[in-house]
Image (cartoon, rainbow, N blue to C red):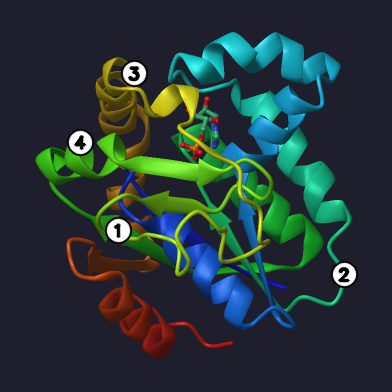
Amino acid sequence: MNFFVFLGAPGSGKGTQAQGLAAAYADVLLHISTGQLIRDEICSETELGRQIKEKADMGSLVSDDDIFNVLAKKLECVKNKKTIILDGFPRTLNQAVLLKQFAEKTGNMIEKVVYFSIADAELINRLAGRFTCVHCGAVYHNQHNTPKTDGVCDFCGSHDFHVRPDDRKEIVEKRLRVYHEETEPLVSYYEAQGLLFKLDASQTVERIKEILLKNISL
Ligand code: AMP
């Protein structure tokens, strides 16, 4: 099992690319979004879900231990997948260390860290138009990435969409601030380890997919 870490600000397109790749290569590739795992905990009203709902809705990070435990529980159930795309994890230096230790302990490796680089102004514009499928969490945008059939999810056929609470304009700025403070230091952390692959995330969804396919060995 190899890990590809998709690193970037909220709205940089890492989730869209991860879900597209995982759908195209479902037999070997698994997309794990820690944000989606958190939303699942909240919707299922688990003990943890109740504790972290407010934090997540307000755009703050949940604790490193909580997020790592949720991820580790998910990874325990993974079978027969060669490659895991981690979308939204790690998001702090401490989480990066936890991941490194986990990979070493379980004999897996972090193959590459794809850094989706993009200016804040573009991110705010993107997040403002974002909506997600209530059923499977697929992410769309009302200008750049609409469902193939209007009102129908490409991935699960559901007709129910919503705007995530943390995609509200006033929360988006907070999430970007948290990203710059907590997550951006990971760029130089992984660069120093020779793992970083920097991508211009302002390009089209199709172009970025092409670049990824050339650089991810499945
Ligand atoms: P996302 O969908 O990746 O933007 O994540 C949504 C929310 O889930 C974040 O704003 C955090 O509250 C929480 N979350 C997701 N991944 C992490 C992480 N690696 N560390 C801490 N909190 C996280």
Q: Amino acid under label 4? A: Ile
Q: Nearer the viewer, mark 1 or mark 4?
A: 4
Spot occupied by residue 12 in the image (x, y as percentages of width and height): 30, 51
What is the C-alpha distance between the residues marked 3 and 1? Answer: 21 Å
Helix, strand or loop for disc 2: loop
Return the mark for residue 116: 1
Q: Are marks 2 and 1 in contact (CB under 8 Å)?
A: no
Task: Tell which circle, 2 or 1, labels the residue nearer the N-terminal end.
Answer: 2
Q: Could you tell me which residue is drawn at 69 percent across and 39 percent down?
A: 37
Q: Earlier in the sequence, mark 3 or mark 1?
A: 1
Task: Characterize the local packing of mark 2: few (<14), some (14-19) or many (20 or more) Cα atoms within 10 angstroms.
Answer: few
Q: Secondary structure at mark 4?
A: helix
Residue behind mark 2: 79
Question: What amino acid type is highlighted by mark number 1?
Answer: Phe
Q: Can you tell which of label 3 and label 2 is closer to the viewer?
A: 3
Q: Quadrant of residue 156?
A: bottom right
Q: Of the residues under marks 3 and 2, which one precedes in the sequence?
A: 2
The residue wearing badge 4 is: 124
Please report whichever mark, 1 or 4, sits nearer to the chain's N-terminal start: 1
Name the quarter where the C terminus is drawn: bottom right
**Who is closer to the viewer here, 34 or 24?**
24
The count of marks equals: 4
Q: Is residue 123 left or right of residue 25?
A: left
169 vs 21: above or below: above
Q: CA distance from mark 4 to mark 2?
A: 37 Å
